[in-house]
Amino acid sequence: MPVVEGYAETARAARYVEQLSSHFGHEPGGMKVLASEPGQLVVDLGGATWSLRADPAGLTLRVESADASLLTQLSSRVAERIEQIGRRDGLTVHWQPASSA
C-alpha cells in the first residue's frame, strides 16, 4: 500500500495532537477517529488513513492509501491543515516516501 511520511518540527506537538483529536471527534466531512490516546491519533480520511504522533521535537505524520493519486491529494490536504493550525508557530510539513518494512 502506498505510504508517505512527514514531519513538522514544533515543541508543542502534543498540543496539536490534542487539538486535532477534539476537532475530528466531531467527524467533519465524515472523517472518523479510529484511535486516539495522549500524543497519538489515527483518522479515517475516507480512502486513506492518517496517523499523527507527537514526539519531543515535533509531529510525525503518516498517510496510507491503496490509491496513489488519492494519497498525493490527501497528504497535501493534511499538510495544509497542519500548517494552517500551526501558522503562529510557522509549522511546515516535510513529506517523503515511507521506507518499506
Image (cartoon, helix red, strand yellow):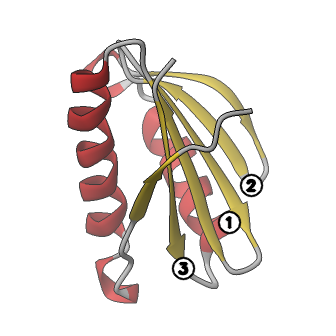
Nearer the N terminus, badge 2 or badge 1?
1
Nearer the N terminus, badge 2 or badge 3?
3
The dot on residue 14 is: 1
Nearer the N terminus, badge 3 or badge 1?
3
Closer-to-camera residue (53/16): 53
Residue 36 percent location from the top left of the image? 71, 35
Amino acid type at image mark 2 = Gly
Closer-to-camera residue (46/65): 65
Residue drawn 29% across the image and 54% down it: 81
- Name the residue beneath numbered marker 2: 39
- Name the residue beneath numbered marker 3: 9
> Looking at the image, is 59 positioned above or below residue 92?
above
> In the image, is 73 to the left or to the right of 46?
left
Amino acid type at image mark 1 = Ala
> Looking at the image, is 47 positioned above or below residue 96?
above
Closer-to-camera residue (4/60): 4
Amino acid type at image mark 3 = Glu
Residue drawn 26% across the image and 36% down it: 72
Where does the C terminus fall, quadrant-wise?
Answer: top right
Which corner quadrant of the image does residue 69 belong to? top left
Mark 3 vs mark 1, foreground winner is: 3
